[in-house]
Image (tube, rainbow, N blue to C red):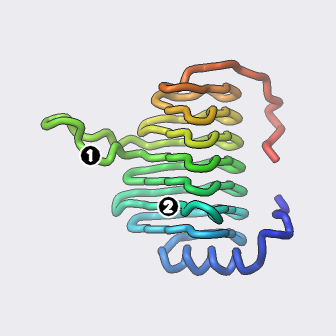
Amino acid sequence: MAWPKHVSALAALRAQRILRSAGADFRGLPRFRGQVAVANQGRLVAGAGLLVDSRRYPTQIAVGPDGELVLGDDVFINQGADIWAAHRVVIGDRVMLGPHVTVADDGAHDVAPGIPRRVEPVVIESDAWLGRRSIVMPGVTVGRWAVVGAGSVVTADVAPCTVVAGVPARVVRTFPQPPDSFRR
């Protein structure tokens, strides 16, 4: 994927510096525009063509001590996104995360005494699209080509080629997708 000319070489140098200082493994030329905070205590792997655009609102990417975050090729993360991997988060190739999207594999704290917090892997398969302010909860798999509507809270798996929306997210419709195509 060729990035637009306005995604400068400076954005690539900045991204490489931030990822290197966080101890991340990356391929190609990742690009960060604006404020991107990366805190990596575990394993962070970024594929070629990663683009994070945070010119108006900062984006946070964090990996805990026992965590792993894998970002596929040509992933786009929009401003204000928050990704937290306490255990394992996998984001496939050509996934697009809209503004202020949250992806977390950890409930962050206990709900009540004696009820442990939920820590389960999250998988966003290739070519999925998560709309503005959507939230993907622990233990969820979002299938290939799935679309998550703006403001949705995804608490259960989303099948491939499915549009979901709402709180909690429910199936709005399904659509056919040729197996050899990919999102541009």
User: Which residue position holds label 1?
Assistant: 109
User: Which residue position holds label 2?
Assistant: 60
Q: Residue at x 44, y 50 (%)?
A: 88
- Quadrant housing residue 159: top right
Sooner in the amino-acid sequence: mark 2 or mark 1: 2
The alpha-carbon separation of the residues under discs 2 and 1 comes to: 19 Å
**Type of residue at label 2?**
Gln
Q: How many marks?
A: 2
Q: Residues within 10 Å of mark 1 (few under 14, many from 20)?
A: few
Indicate whether 41 appears above or below 177: below
* Residue 11: numbered disc: none
Q: Is residue 152 left or right of residue 163?
A: left
Horizontal and vertical percent for residue 31?
A: 69, 69
Q: Is residue 123 left or right of residue 42?
A: right
Horizontal and vertical percent for residue 45?
A: 55, 63
Q: Residue at x 36, y 46 (%)?
A: 106
Of 178 and 80, the residue lying toward us? 80
